[in-house]
Structures are given as C-alpha cells and as structure tokens.
Amino acid sequence: MSDGPLEVRRSKGNSDETAVWNRAASDSGGPSPREGDLALSALLRVHGLVVNGGIFHAFEAATEAELRASCAGFRYFGFGKVADLLEAARNEEWMEDVFNSKLFYWNEVPKGGHFAALEQPELFVAELRKSLARMR
C-alpha cells in the first residue's frame, strides 16, 4: 500500500528527480513543497501555457502572481534569460518594437479561441484570406 501515486511511481524504480517532477507537475509541489518544488511548479504552469497557446495566451491566462512566480522559477533553475524575455514581453512598447517590423496583419475577432479553425472555420478562413491578400 502507498501514500499516493508518487509513492507508486517511486516503487517502480523512478528516480528522486522523477518524483520531484511529478510532484511539481501534478500536485503544485505536493502537501509540503520545498523551494525547488514551488519553483518548478510555477515554471511549468507558465511554460505549459506558452507551449499551448503562445506567449500572449500565457499573459492572458496566468495571474500576475503566477507570472512573477514563473519568472522566479526560471531564475531558480538558471534560466534567467527566459525570465528576462517574459518580463520584457509583458511590456507593450517592447513588443511593438520587436514585432512591428515583421507583423503585416493584425485583427482581433469577436469569436473563436485557441482552436479557431475548428471553432469558427468561416471566420478563420476569412481572416486567413485577409492576411494573405496583403502579401500579393
């Protein structure tokens, strides 16, 4: 008998690192999280949002406290440049400087979400056509 899924994973021969990863990824650090558990959990939360929907999605979905904690988590694990990038990207002027030279079309639509092509296919196609028409 075990105390939970992490004990089962450890008993199957996984390393302590795997147990830490599982705790941070699924239990927000577990019932008695250590500093590293909290740092990894915060880092994974925002990393998952960025991978799932992009950096702007992460900024919309995460709270201010979660964003600060994730930056601290990235720094804790030696990824200070990632934290610097996240902090800079939250500055609207910085984003305009970086993307205005490459951005050729922008529009916010009233419907659709992360899976816009499936949720609002007609609207998605119309927006795609508008954006590509500028490239002719």
Image (spheres, grey):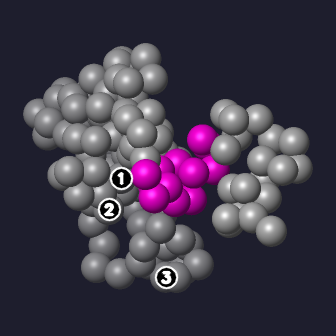
Residue corresponding to mark 3: 120
- Please tell me which residue lies in front, 84 or 38: 38
Residue corresponding to mark 2: 61
The answer to whether the residue labelled 2 contacts the one labelled 1, judged by CB atoms less than 8 Å apart, is: yes
Task: Report whether 8 appears left or right of 101.
Answer: right
**Which label was assigned to residue 58?**
1
Name the residue at 41% across, 78% down: 112
Name the residue at 40% across, 62% down: 130
Query: Residue 55: x, y in percent?
Result: 37, 46
Determine crowd level at label 1: few under 14, some 14-19, many 20+ residues with C-alpha closer than 10 A. Answer: many
Going from the N terminus, do you reach mark 3 or mark 1 first? 1
Query: Residue 21: x, y in percent?
Result: 61, 43
Say what amino acid the circle numbered 2 marks: Ala
Q: Secondary structure at mark 3?
A: loop
Q: Secondary structure at mark 2?
A: helix
> From which residue to which does the magenta span run?
20-32
Name the residue at 52% across, 82% down: 119
Is 3 located above or below residue 132 in the figure? below
Say what amino acid the circle numbered 3 marks: Gln
| C-alpha distance separating marks 2 and 3 | 21 Å
Query: Residue 116: x, y in percent?
Result: 49, 73
| C-alpha distance separating marks 2 and 1 | 5 Å
- Please tell me which residue lies in front, 26 or 80: 26
Is 136 located above or below residue 74 in the figure? below
